[in-house]
């Protein structure tokens, strides 16, 4: 129990993460299972809550759904909870988040020729988990409808 509590001291962890880390430390599967079950009863481990927190933080940080899904998978969140956590919020759609992220990042690329800046911006957005088709559509709409954006 002490080893599990030390792991939780630094950050929330999923059941899968706890199981894996405790297994690496040499604990038996039976002991780990009972410790994780007790931590769940005490609400110290809650995969659903963790998934929601990770998705909310990722969305605030401008991450796309693909990146969020990968983060949840890497953190050991079961697929059934991943689907529930990724349900679109009423606050902001994927497109609105993409537009906000583009507007935030664009000034970093302004000293470059426009095609180079757009290519680098698209690469950054793809790494953040946005779909290439969405990026193309939004950048086309933003750059061709906004005369304030820099030209070549």
Image: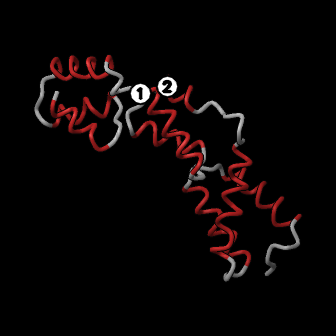
Q: Quadrant of residue 128?
A: bottom right
Is label 1 in a helix, a strand or a loop? helix
Using residue 140 as the reference point, say whether residue 80 is left or right of it: left
Q: Quadrant of residue 92?
A: top right
Using residue 30 as the reference point, say whether residue 51 is left or right of it: right
Q: Is residue 134 above or below residue 80?
A: below
Which residue does the numbered mark 2 point to in the structure image? 81
**What residue is drawn where x is 68% and y is 69%?**
106
The CA span between labels 2 and 1 is 8 Å
Residue 73, percent from left and from top:
43, 36
First in residue order: circle 2 vs circle 1: 1
Residue 61, percent from left and from top:
56, 52
**What residue is drawn where x is 27% and y is 40%?**
9
Which residue does the numbered mark 1 point to in the structure image? 47
Nearer to the camera, 85 or 44: 44
Q: Quadrant of residue 83?
A: top right
Residue 135, percent from left and from top:
71, 55
Q: Residue furthest left?
A: 26
**What residue is drawn where x is 67% and y is 83%?**
111
Nearer to the camera, 53 or 129: 53
Label 2–label 1 contact, CB within 8 A: yes
Sort mark 1 into few (<14), some (14-19) or many (20+) by Cα contacts within 10 Å: many
Sort mark 2 into few (<14), some (14-19) or many (20+) by Cα contacts within 10 Å: some
**What residue is drawn where x is 63% and y is 50%?**
130
Badge count: 2
Is label 2 in a helix, a strand or a loop? helix
Residue 125, percent from left and from top:
61, 58
Q: Quadrant of the N terminus?
A: top left
Q: Which mark, by number, is residue 95?
A: none
Q: Nearer the viewer, mark 2 or mark 1?
A: 1
Q: Is residue 152 above or below residue 124?
A: below
């Amino acid at each position: 129990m002490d080893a599990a509590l030390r792991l939780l001291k630094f950050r929330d962890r999923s059941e899968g993460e706890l199981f894996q880390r405790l297994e690496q430390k040499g604990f038996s599967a039976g002991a780990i299972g009972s410790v994780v079950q007790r931590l769940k009863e005490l609400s110290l481990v809650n995969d659903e809550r963790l998934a929601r927190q990770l998705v909310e933080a990722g969305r605030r940080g401008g991450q796309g759904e693909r990146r969020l899904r990968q983060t949840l998978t890497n953190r050991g969140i079961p697929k059934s909870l991943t689907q529930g956590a990724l349900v679109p919020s009423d606050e902001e759609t994927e497109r609105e988040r993409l537009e906000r992220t583009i507007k935030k990042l664009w000034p970093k690329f302004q000293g470059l020729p426009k095609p180079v800046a757009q290519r680098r911006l698209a690469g950054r957005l793809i790494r953040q988990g946005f779909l290439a088709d969405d990026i193309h559509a939004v950048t086309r709409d933003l750059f061709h409808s906004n005369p304030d954006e820099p030209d070549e």
